[in-house]
Structures are given as structure tokens and as C-alpha cells.
Image (cartoon, grey):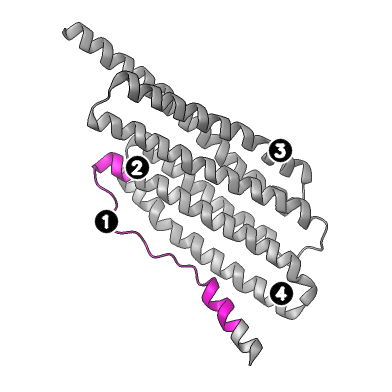
Amino acid sequence: MTELNNHIVSAFDRDLEGIQAQIMKMGGLVEAAIMEAATSLETRDVEKAERVRNGDKLIDALEETLNDEAARVIALRAPTASDLRVVLSVMRMSSNLERIGDLAKNIAKRTDVLVQMPQVGDTPTSLRRMAREVELMLKDALDAYIQRDDALALDVIARDEDVDKMHNALFREFLTFMLEDPSNITACMHLHFIAKNIERMGDHVTSIAEQVVFLATGEKPEEARQKGDETAAELGQHSASNGS
């Protein structure tokens, strides 16, 4: 009986290693997609933007494969509560990674439109810096997952506030450009959409880090951080002042 139990445990460990290898591969592809999308915007490289759009198909396929494998493990191995938590966490992480991939694809789509318009200030470079911060957060979140490092995961969660601040600062820049020259309005609306997508990426990375904290400690982070999105309030203020 002991030999059978050992066989079951080793089979589950192999399955789990395979699932974790898949999530890390998916994470690597998503990291690359974030930076390629932002760089394609900064350099106005439509070919790179197209590679991001096409690469999203592989990210989607990996999520589907990973979820199928996780479901098979749950059905065949009947994992214990702690092992089940690992499998379910991986499924949630893959969902967040897939959404980040979609957001990178959306940025790449906007690049095709923006290259037809004059560049607005240095905003593409600022957006690339913001994307770089999110990519580093994702890298650390994945490292925290592999190491079960809740301190690193909590650090990632805290850094999302920096991304929110960058988003708010960019929004104020876009408003200034639009008020100074109405011909910038269309481009700035596209650029704000991109900034919002990057900010949403940060939210998904934060969700991944929260899963790591739960895995490492068995408890969820104490309290969800209040989002620092000031754009809606500022937009309302500008609308009110323009209407008076």
C-alpha cells in the first residue's frame, strides 16, 4: 500500500511540475508581449506590433492546454487540500496571464492606427516605461510563485501603486495636449486607452501576486489596496469647467 501511495504522490508531483513549467512558459511569453507591444508603439514598428497580435494565439492555446491538464490532474489524482490549492491557483494565474496577453494585443492594434498620426510629445516613451514597470512586476510575481516567496509577492502588490501614479500623470499630459491643440484629441484618446490597458495589466499582475501570498501562507492579503485612478474625477472637473 505504501508503494502504491508513493507511486500516486510521484505521479502527482510529475503532473504538477509539468503544469508549473507551462505556467512559466506562458509567463515568459506574456512578459515579452508587454514589452514588444510598448516598444512597437514607441518605435512605430508595425511589423513588431503584428508579431504581438499573432503571438497572442499561442498564449491563448497555452491557457487552454494548462486548464485541460489541471482539470485532468484534479479528476485523476484527487489531490489533497493543499495540493488542490496549488492546481487551482495555477488556473487562476493562467487566466490573469491570458488577460494580460489580450491587453498587449489591444495595444498592438492601436499602434497600427497611431502610426498614421503625428506623434504627441514624448508620450510613447512614457508608456514604454510604464509597461516596463509592469513587466518587472510580472517577472517578480512569477519568481515569487516558484520560490513561494510571500514577501516578494507583497512587494509586487505594493508596486502597483507606482503604476497607478504613472497612469494618472500620463492622463494629465494627454489632457494638456488636447486642450493646447484640439487636433491631438484623437491620438490622445488612443494613447489614453493604451495607458489604461497597461494599468489594467498591473491589476492582473497584482492578482497573480495575491495568489502567491495565498499559496505561501494559506491566507489572502489582508485588505485590497484602494485603486489610485484619479482620471474619472479629473475628467469630470475639466468637463464642468468647460461647461461653465
Q: Residue 105 placed where, x, y %?
A: 65, 45
Instruction: Name the amino acid type tagged 3.
Output: Arg
Which residues are drawn in magenta?
211-238
Give the residue displayed 50% in from the left and 41% down from the top: 97
Left or right of 238 on screen, residue 207: left
Left or right of 25 on screen, residue 153: left
Residue receiving disc 4? 177
Foreground residue among 165 and 80: 80
View extreme (bottom): residue: 244
**Magenta includes 117?**
no
Mark 1 and mark 2 in contact (Cβ < 8 Å)?
no
Q: Earlier in the sequence, mark 1 or mark 4?
A: 4
Give the residue displayed 46% in from the left and 48% down from the top: 205
Q: Residue 6 placed where, x, y %?
A: 23, 12
Q: Earlier in the sequence, mark 3 or mark 4?
A: 3
- The crowd level at tag 3 (other Cα within 10 Å; few <14, some 14-19, many 20+) is some
Instruction: Name the amino acid type tagged 1.
Output: Glu
Q: Residue 214 placed where, x, y %?
A: 29, 44
In whole angstroms, how far apart are the C-alphas of marks 2 and 3? 30 Å
Foreground residue among 68 and 230: 68
Q: Helix, strand or loop at disc 4?
A: helix
Q: Earlier in the sequence, mark 2 or mark 4?
A: 4
Residue receiving disc 2? 212
